[in-house]
Amino acid sequence: MTTPTATRQDIVDTVYEACVEILQADRSTLSETTAFAADLEADSLALVEIVMVLEERFDLRIPEEDLDGVDTIGAAADLVSERLAAAA
Amino acid sequence: MVVTGVGVVSPAGLDAHTTFDHVLAAKGVTTAELTAPVVDFDPTCWIDPREVRRIDRVGQFGLAAAAEAIAQAGLTTNGSTVDPRRVAVVVGSGVGGLTTLEDGVETRVTKGSHRVGPLLVPMMMPNATAGLIALRHGFRGAALAVATACASGANSIGEGMHLIRSGRADVVVAGGSEAAITPTALAGFARMGALSSRTSDPAGASRPFDRDRDGFVMGEGAGIVVLESEDHATRRGATILGEVAGYGATCDAHHLTAPDPTGQGALESMRLAIADAGLDPRSIGHVNAHGTSTPLNDRAESDALVALFGGPTPPVTSTKGVTGHLVGAAGAVEAVIGLLSARSGRVPPVANLTDPDVDPDVDLVRDEPRSINGTVVLSNSFGFGGHNAALVLIARPST
């Protein structure tokens, strides 16, 4: 699905939804500073699953090497924003 | 070698005793689709909801059955009851996480390789269940998966027993798990002529040793036992349910899937198991046969039983008339049923048996549970690949 008009909030909301679906996270506790590993106990496989949700939702491909340093919900949203801008 | 805990998830119940009671009643659970699925299984009763989606159904069954067996055995590694480095896990499967594999293939074909998820491999690998049980309970001895098709559960218990005998473990969590009621697996088994096609009478589709049998009904589930040396069990005050006293394993080396019609390999595995237990065939109180309801297996197995006993056999049952064929879990579930039968002195009848197609010397249990006194049970399992595994278990009376 192509979403050229995705706003920052759309992207953050999608990361939240992925955290709820994949990590059974409590949505009300999530913020952009929530850390995948430290706060949500996500391992590397879960992180890949979250990225796959983002790839599908925003019709993107995010290479494995781009995930270095993507530790928080905000950082994941930044990555998606950058990739969308690059693709535009 | 004693058994201090048993656990079962089966189409006939979500624990060992429910399954046993259901099997005693000899009411089949085969659906209109000619399968015997586990129903009302809520994995979150045993597994953190967060983990459930990362574990294939085969692993979920294994974890549930292991939890029951381990709780009954009172096995804890965070207290002082056992040294976690001395607890091994041997849990087999015929095919592993087949649902996951089939979904993954479909995803790749329809959506592309980049849509195949990172959990495909850990969910489909046939050793996942053994690894998950070790991980869940902190067991740090060897964790192994024996894959011998429909004999996996029995071979796992037998090989687990050897880990203790050889001094490589104090405790072994052993058994089998299977969840292979998938469209592709069913198509494959059907095409090879292994499955019943008795659509006009699904409830009667699984009919071991009956003249009208036409194949097996695919079931699913898991069976787990906790094994330990008698000294070890006594020292920690565990309740002893019975013994795994003997194990025999052979290969037909006849055909990859068809049983040797002479039943020679099957017979040899039974003789080895009985000799391993230091017993004589006359000691066997009853037989929990492999009895799949396929034309070839049931004929070869019943002939082998006549040869083993040299005439009239002790009471013989097959639980697959009720449960269908649990493939890699079958041998473990049936070892548990056999042990519970011997403990209770009641052997379940063969469901759907109306016209026995065996030598008259084979004493099939029909219609009603049979009361027995003997505490020794011979449990047979045979698998594609030519695998034959026989276990001799001895019940200890309930106290």
Image: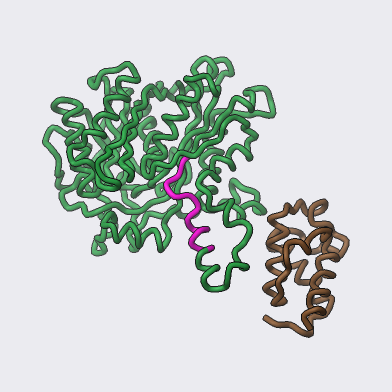
Chain colours: A brown, B green
* Image quadrant where one finds the C terminus of chain B: top left
Q: Extreme left residue here?
A: B360
Compared across the picture, whether A1 is left or right of A12 comes to left
Front position in the image: B103 or B298: B103
* Image quadrant where one finds the N terminus of chain B: top left
Compared across the picture, whether B47 is left or right of B224 comes to right
The stretch in magenta equals B92-104
Above/below status of B256 relative to B72: below
Marker count (numbered):
0
Question: Is-magenta flag for residue B93?
Answer: yes
Q: Position of residue B7 (x, y in %)?
A: 48, 37
Q: Extreme right residue here?
A: A33
Above/below status of B269 relative to B95: above
Compared across the picture, whether B346 is left or right of B233 comes to left
Residue B197, quarter of the rendered image? bottom left
Front position in the image: B4 or A76: A76
Above/below status of B80 relative to A46: above
Question: Is-magenta flag for residue B62?
Answer: no
Q: Position of residue B214 (x, y in %)?
A: 22, 54
For image coordinates 56% across by 38% down, the residue present is B67
Q: Position of residue B90 (x, y in %)?
A: 50, 35
Q: Position of residue B269 (x, y in %)?
A: 29, 30
